[in-house]
Image (cartoon, grey):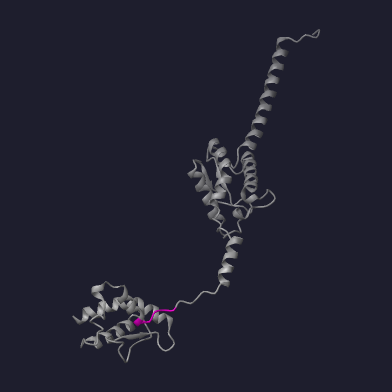
Amino acid sequence: MNGKMNRSEVRGNMIRHLLLAAAVAATLAGCSSAQASPLLSGTPTSQGAEASKRAVASKLAVDASGGSADGTPWEYDIKNPDAQAFVQRVVTCLHRKGVQYAEVDAEPSGDRLTFSLGGPNNDRTSITRGLDLTPQCEREAKPAQPETPTGPTPAQVASSTAAQKTPQPSPVPLTVQQKMKQDADNAPAQDAGTPWEYNVANPKAKAFVQAMVACLHRKGVQYVEPDAKPSGDRLTFSLGGPNNDRTSITRGLDLIPQCEREVAAAQR
């Protein structure tokens, strides 16, 4: 042919080149799809879907709990009784942040519980946004850790120690007589003197004091009894018993006004 190709040979070479280019493009497209589509929910037997699942499983292992692809993070481990709830919280978080197609996988992948992104049509927005948001949702899905209590500062410790070393006088509770005198001293001038209910000149004063003692007993004051002798022109009662029981004294003093009102109302 003198080194020249006729039209048939030229046409044949062009067809062969086109077929070769198409084959190369299809191969590259298949590789790109397998690497770029994470955790696709296509047919399990598809090589592209399996490669994608492996790629996302590896990413989840790196992102979750600082783990690596060499082991399953405890949050996703099928041996963890809380793993299912954790994965569900991650998926719920992704939904809340705008990832439309995210769902928990029905079956584990080896020893790992997983979730899928992209839905039946491999929605690219859900896949890319889901992968970006997975670490954040994993952090939010973990149970809140209790705050570590901070100890007192050295200055606070020194102040507390000094306060403990300084002896503090124990407060001495007032007796009924002292409290009544204090009340009388603090009362307006027109109210000065022994209240009529306690006055020895009142024929009902003894019954009033006895009713006061009964009321205090009824309200839980253990040690309270009428005094055998009046204090001046006043009939009185004592709190605390022979051992000056602190609870009876403080509780009794708090309850005296209430019992006085109740007894006075009952005697009207």
* Quarter of the rendering occupied by the N terminus: top right
Which residues lie in the magenta part?
Answer: 172-177
Report the front residue among 145 and 181: 181
Residue 20 at what x, y percent from top left?
70, 24
Task: Return the residue found at the far right.
Answer: 2
Query: Height in image: 200 above or below 12?
Result: below
Query: Height in image: 35 above or below 16?
Result: below
Residue 183: quarter of image? bottom left
At 39% from the left and 79% from the top, the residue drawn is 174
Task: Return the residue found at the far left.
Answer: 268
Residue 232 at what x, y percent from top left?
29, 87
Relative to 211, 106 lies left or right: right
At 71% from the left and 13% from the top, the residue drawn is 10
Residue 98 at what x, y percent from top left?
49, 40
At 56% from the left and 71% from the top, the residue drawn is 164
Residue 197 at what x, y percent from top left?
24, 82
* Quarter of the rendering occupied by the C terminus: bottom left
Relative to 11, 100 lies left or right: left
Is residue 175 within the magenta segment? Answer: yes
Report the front residue among 42 and 220: 220
Q: Give the mark count.
A: 0
Relative to 28, 125 lies left or right: left
Res 42 visible:
no
Query: Height in image: 239 above or below 130?
Result: below
Residue 32: quarter of image? top right
